[in-house]
């Protein structure tokens, strides 16, 4: 069976060059031309893909086969990898570059399809979009490939693996870490290499319409051509694909990825969670004759009670450099928008390894420029301060890197941790509260209009479409 696949792939490869050669001749004659993929070739190629799909569906990891079965399939010669994916017209689309794909063994063909599906299940299309302003494209691409390739066998010879990264950049990265962990370390290595050797960015001189070999720097460029959707909507589409693909047992690593996706799908963003916490804060009550007493409603002489909607809130800001000015201003807009109807008392606490300044804020105009101090990070001083103020809620903005244990425990108030865009986890063993992520800002959001507190938030930048798409 394997020999049959190899011979059929070789025959298709020869047919590919029959019309690619014609295209290249027209280009050399300075004739404007586009690659015309013959209808018969497309039919034959996708029949071959159907056979690969059947093998995937018969495999013990048939999840990938059923997932591929739902995807739209297209041919593109301008992608620098055997396969690529994006999201178009309410469907996930998988693209094949026959000039690269058909040179692989049957096992490697299956692996490269699994590779793309794991990117989708891991939400890399979303996470890369959110981090594109923090890391270079090369660092992001290689980091994502490390994550998914760790779970795959029969990788193509030029695949990016953890071993290759450690050897190439003299790193000691650990396996089974997060995408963000790899991106941070690889970016540091790339920056160091660029400074010491002054290496320019790679620039391919080959025809942009035809790629014949793998290039990690551009392998995920096609993601930019995806339809612009908010994170939750794309997650819901992904969940539908996943649910329709689970026809039997799936590997443990896939179970973990799917569980993480479903958790993020039904988990409230930090600002909505803050709003929910605001509504549950126990506030002072005031007596009123307009409402009956709840305990003895028949006693008209007893006054009822109304919530006074006055609670004390501390917003702690890590000024050690983990939270950017843009992130801080955006977060404060969200906070003030949420609390404006509650008439709560808000105190800003600026801190690093000690408390540097505290002040009360009622409107966005009361917000002061942050102190230009860059110390270490300790969480305990804020909790020591909060314990003396009889507060109802502490909201702590930080990158999460501080002590492992608090020197003092919080007293009778709720705590919401909001980690910055680069923050991956909270260093505390016991958080004493809820941990949420702060959505990264767009580049143009670094300058915000304080006169309009309705502005802010994140949406994907409009991207220029990639040409050379074949139906």
Image (spheres, grey):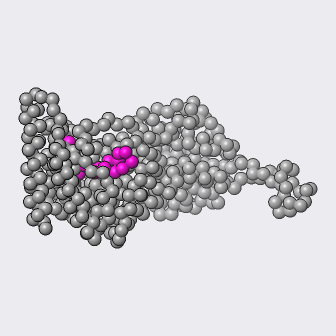
Q: Is residue 226 above or below residue 31?
A: below
Q: In the figure, residue 470 lies in which quadrant?
A: top left
At x 65%, y 55%, the residue is 280
Left or right: 439 with respect to 408?
left
| One can see residue 98 in this view | yes
Looking at the rendered image, the quarter that the N terminus falls into is bottom left
| One can see residue 139 in this view | no
Total label count? 0
Residue 333 pos. (x, y %) = 56, 39
Residue 131 pos. (x, y %) = 37, 45
The magenta segment is 78-95
Left or right: 31 with respect to 136?
left
Give the main secondary structure, helix, strand or loop, of the magenta stretch.
Answer: strand
Left or right: 196 with respect to 238?
left
At x 46%, y 32%, the residue is 447
Q: Is residue 467 above or below residue 180?
A: above
Q: Is residue 56 magenta?
A: no
Looking at the rendered image, the quarter that the C terminus falls into is top left
Please state which of residues 121 and 39 is positioned toward the viewer in this rendering: 39
Residue 197 pos. (x, y %) = 18, 41
Q: In the figure, residue 348 lies in which quadrant?
A: top right
Please state which of residues 263 and 242 is positioned toward the viewer in this rendering: 242
Residue 184 pos. (x, y %) = 32, 50
Q: Is residue 79 magenta?
A: yes
Left or right: 16 with respect to 392?
left
At x 68%, y 49%, the residue is 311
Name, please, the residue furthest toward the top: 30
Name, please, the residue furthest toward the right: 301
């Amino acid at each position: 069976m394997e020999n049959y696949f190899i011979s059929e792939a070789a025959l298709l490869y020869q047919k590919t060059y029959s019309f690619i050669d014609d295209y290249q001749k027209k280009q050399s004659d300075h004739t404007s031309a586009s690659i015309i993929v013959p209808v018969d070739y497309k039919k034959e190629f996708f029949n071959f893909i159907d056979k690969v799909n059947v093998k995937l569906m018969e495999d013990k990891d048939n999840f990938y086969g059923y997932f591929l079965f739902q995807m739209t399939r297209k041919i593109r010669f301008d992608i620098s990898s055997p396969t690529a994916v994006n999201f178009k017209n309410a469907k996930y689309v998988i693209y094949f570059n026959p000039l690269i794909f058909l040179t692989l063994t049957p096992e490697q063909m299956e692996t490269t399809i699994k590779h793309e599906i794991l990117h989708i299940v891991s939400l890399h299309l979303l996470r890369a979009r959110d981090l594109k302003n923090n890391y270079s494209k090369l660092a992001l691409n290689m980091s994502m490939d490390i994550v998914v390739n760790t779970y795959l066998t029969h990788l193509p010879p030029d695949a990016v693996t953890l071993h290759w990264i450690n050897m190439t950049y003299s790193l000691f990265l650990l396996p089974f870490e997060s995408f963000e962990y790899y991106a941070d370390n690889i970016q540091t290595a790339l920056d160091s290499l660029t400074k010491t050797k002054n290496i320019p960015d790679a620039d391919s001189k080959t025809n942009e319409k035809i790629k014949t070999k793998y290039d990690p720097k551009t392998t995920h460029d096609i993601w930019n051509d995806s339809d612009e959707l908010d994170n939750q909507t794309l997650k819901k589409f992904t969940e539908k694909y996943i649910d329709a693909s689970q026809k039997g047992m799936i590997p443990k690593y896939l179970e973990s990825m799917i569980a993480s996706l479903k958790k993020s799908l039904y988990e409230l963003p930090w600002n909505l969670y803050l709003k929910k916490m605001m509504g549950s804060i126990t506030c002072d009550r005031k007596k009123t004759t307009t409402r009956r007493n709840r305990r003895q409603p028949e006693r008209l002489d007893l006054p009822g009670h109304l919530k006074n909607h006055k609670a004390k809130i501390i917003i702690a800001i890590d000024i050690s450099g983990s939270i950017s000015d843009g992130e801080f201003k955006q977060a404060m807009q969200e906070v003030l928008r949420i609390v404006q109807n509650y008439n709560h008392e808000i105190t800003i606490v600026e801190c690093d390894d000690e408390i540097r300044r505290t002040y009360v804020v009622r409107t966005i105009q009361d917000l002061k420029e942050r102190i230009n101090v860059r110390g270490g990070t300790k969480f305990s001083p804020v909790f020591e301060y909060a314990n003396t103020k009889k507060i109802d809620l502490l909201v702590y903005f930080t990158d999460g890197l501080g002590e492992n244990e608090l020197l003092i425990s919080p007293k009778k108030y709720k705590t919401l941790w909001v980690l910055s865009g680069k923050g991956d986890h909270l260093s505390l063993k016991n958080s004493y509260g809820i941990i949420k992520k702060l959505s990264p800002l767009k580049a143009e959001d670094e300058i915000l209009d304080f006169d309009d507190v309705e502005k802010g938030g994140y949406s994907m930048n409009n991207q220029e479409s990639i040409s050379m798409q074949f139906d």
